Image (tube, rainbow, N blue to C red):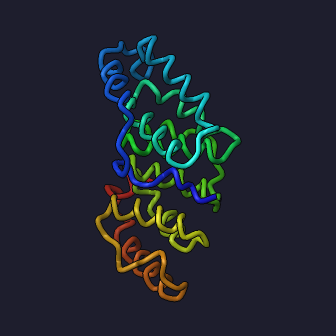
Amino acid sequence: MHLRFTLAAGALALAASCATTAGEARTAQSVGPWLAASPNLSQQIQDQITRLPWTHGLERVETIHWFASVGEPAYEELLELVADPRSDVAGAALAALGATRDSRLVEPLRRIPWPTDSEDALGLERARALLRLGDWSMIPRLIEGLGHESFMVRTLCLQALQEATHEDFDYHPGESEPVRRFGVVRWQEWWSARSADPILTGGG
């Protein structure tokens, strides 16, 4: 699985309906931990949740952007989808949550049961989402992902690392494995020199 739907936010224009739904979200009342959706927006969210598993390619990317633009009123549903047994659906939910850049999502996302030793692309997508939300403890996991067999997964891991740190250490995901390994070592050395700082790691 390549998780193609997680390409950088902003690469595509949001659907015209996003402005309307985002506006409705701002005028909704707060209920529970998250801002509640208006009845109309709530129905739109449910409709998109129902459609999500059957979207593909560009349509999937646009759906992720739609959820990210709605933001808080969709958090509860997206957090539930993270545990979906369909890896592509769970990955889409993770991508949408990460794209919000709302650091309040870090703890709720961390509390969702997840294999700590997961090595698959979905585990890397979770790490990527958490890093985009501000959890720098995910950096070692994404550095490991630079050695993944999938070019797309390596690219997405590098993208998340670059966004957070503004570094690249001359690592290129399309290079040969020996060349890539040199870049991975530079990333590891950089993190080793900084990982003792609790301000960077967030305490874990």
Total count of labels: 0
Left/right placement of residue 15 relative to residue 27 reads right
Residue 203 visible at all: no
Q: Position of residue 30 (x, y in %)?
A: 37, 15
Q: Is residue 94 above or below residue 143?
A: above
* Quarter holding residue 188: bottom left
In percent of the image, x 34 and y 18: which residue is there? 24
Q: Is residue 26 above or below residue 188?
A: above
* Quarter holding residue 196: bottom left
18 or 170, which is in the foreground?
A: 18
Q: Position of residue 148 (x, y in %)?
A: 58, 70
Q: Quadrant of the N terminus?
A: bottom right
Q: Is residue 31 above or below residue 83?
A: above
Residue 38 visible at all: yes
Residue closest to the far bottom: 178
Left/right placement of residue 97 relative to residue 148 reads left
Q: Position of residue 90 (x, y in %)?
A: 60, 43
In percent of the image, x 55 and y 22: which residue is there? 46
Q: Position of residue 67 (x, y in %)?
A: 45, 34
* Quarter holding residue 160: bottom left
188 or 3, which is in the foreground?
A: 3
Left/right placement of residue 46 relative to residue 16 reads right
In percent of the image, x 36 and y 38: which residue is there? 14
